[in-house]
Amino acid sequence: MPDPHPASPALIGLPAVAQRLGVNQRHIRRLVAERRIPFLKWGHLLRFDPTEIDTWLHGCRQAPHDCA
C-alpha cells in the first residue's frame, strides 16, 4: 500500500533560516510576527519547511529593469 504522506524535507529551525537568508535571527522573528514568512509553530517552537521558504523566496523575486 502506498504511503499517504510522501516524504517531505525535514523542517528547519530559526537559526538555519536566518543563515540561509543571510540575516540575523531577530529579523526572522520579525518576519514571523508580521506573518510575512511561512512558518509552523508548535507551542513556543518555530519551524520552517525549506520547500515553502524556497517558494516564498521565488515569489519575492523582482524582475530586473531594462536599462536600454
Image (cartoon, helix red, strand yellow):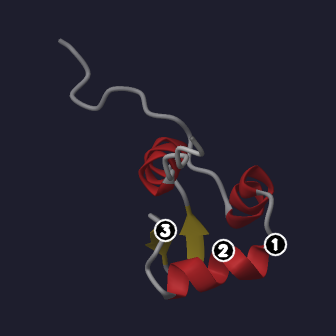
Distance from disc 3 to disc 2, alpha carbons, whole Å, reads 8 Å
| Disc 1: which residue | 24
Residue at (43% x, 80% y) in the render: 35
The residues tagged by marks 2 and 1 sit, at their Cα atoms, a distance apart of: 7 Å
Residue 55 position by quadrant? top left
- Decide which of tag 3 and tag 1 comes sooner along the chain: 1
Q: Nearer the viewer, residue 24 or 65?
A: 65
Instruction: Locate the C terminus by quadrant.
Output: top right
Q: Position of residue 31 (x, y in %)?
A: 56, 78
Left or right for 59, reference 49: left
Local SS, label 1: loop
Q: Residue at x 53, y 79 (%)?
A: 32
Label number found at residue 28:
2
Residue 50: percent from left, percent from top? 55, 45
Question: For the residue carrying disc 3, how many other residues have a C-alpha within 10 Å: few (<14), some (14-19), or many (20+)?
Answer: some
Q: Which residue is mark 3?
A: 37
- Quarter location, residue 48: bottom right
Circle number at residue 52? none
**Residue 36, position as x, y percentages in the image:** 46, 75
Distance of mark 3 from mark 1, alpha carbons? 14 Å
Q: CB of mark 3 within 8 Å of CB of mark 2?
A: yes
**Badge 1: how crowded within 10 Å, few (<14), some, or many (20+)?**
few
Residue 39 to residue 7: above or below = below
Can you name the residue that lies furthest to the top here? 1
In this picture, is 60 found above or below 34? Answer: above
At numbered mark 3, what does the secondary structure look like: helix, strand or loop?
loop
- Mark 2 touching mark 1, by CB under 8 A? yes
Q: Residue at x 52, y 35 (%)?
A: 9
Q: What secondary structure is marked by label 2?
A: helix
**Residue 17 vs residue 22, the one in the foreground:** 22
Counting the numbered discs, the total is 3
